[in-house]
Image (cartoon, helix red, strand yellow):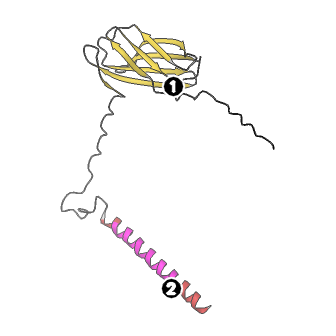
Amino acid sequence: MASAVAVVALAAPAVALTEARIIDVSCHGMRIVQTGLPPRAEFTVEALNAADGQVLAERRVRSSARGRLDVTFRISLRGVHRLHGEVSKRSGEYGEADVSLDARCRVTGTGPPPEPPLTQPTSTAPAAGSPDAGTGGIPAWGWAAGGGGLAALAVLVTVAVTRRSRENMSE
């Protein structure tokens, strides 16, 4: 009787890339942390004043053997209301984080700044009483042409269906 031997290879699970986080914020500094990075890889970590894009601090660092990054910047954050952190390599960005700060450098919110509202286009609706009023701004001739096109399409479909049914009857 033959016996079977099963060999099982166990590998360490891959750690998923997390988004960078800004933590331990005070008026005297901050930390940027991120996990799931390539192990022992070189990265550039930046802290920026998001309001004007000014680089407050920049450092080249290596991730740990487990792909973790933990960078502390001892910088003055007084007067900074929007703080942005970035983790990048020459090949591209690996993570970023944003926080809002109050006058005492306490975090009041996270995430990117709110998008400005979209500007609404000025109305081009026709004036009441004009021939195009009530047509959504489409001239009356546009509706007629559109309607005429649909009517022509309906006639063509009807003719094609009628011809097809006559051909099937004669066979």
Q: Quadrant of the N terminus?
A: top right
Secondary structure at badge 1 equals: strand
Compared across the picture, whether 13 is left or right of 59 comes to right
Residue drawn at the location 41% of the way across and 22% of the way down? 21
The magenta stretch is: 143-161
Amino acid residing under circle 1: Glu
Residue drawn at the location 67% of the way across and 31% of the way down? 9
Mark identifier at residue 162: 2
Q: Does the magenta run of residues contain 153?
A: yes
Q: In the rendered image, which quarter is residue 72 located in?
A: top left
Q: In the rendered image, which quarter is residue 5 located in?
A: top right
Secondary structure at badge 2 equals: helix
Identify the residue under disc 1.
93
Q: Position of residue 40 (x, y in %)?
A: 59, 16
Q: Nearer the viewer, residue 96 or 122?
A: 96
Q: Position of residue 59 (x, y in %)?
A: 49, 11
Q: Position of residue 99 (x, y in %)?
A: 34, 22
Q: Nearer the viewer, residue 107 or 68?
A: 68
Mark identifier at residue 141: none
Prevailing SS of the magenta stretch: helix
Compared across the picture, whether 48 is left or right of 167 comes to left
Residue drawn at the location 55% of the way across and 89% of the way down? 166
Q: Are marks 1 and 2 in contact (CB under 8 Å)?
A: no
Is 134 drawn above or below residue 10 in the view shown? below
Query: Residue furthest toward the left?
Result: 129
Q: Residues within 10 Å of mark 2 (few under 14, many from 20)?
A: few
Is 57 drawn above or below residue 8 in the view shown? above
Residue drawn at the location 78% of the way across and 40% of the way down? 3
Q: Nearer the viewer, residue 117 or 37?
A: 37
Q: CA distance from mark 1 to mark 2?
A: 63 Å
Q: Does the magenta run of residues contain 76?
A: no
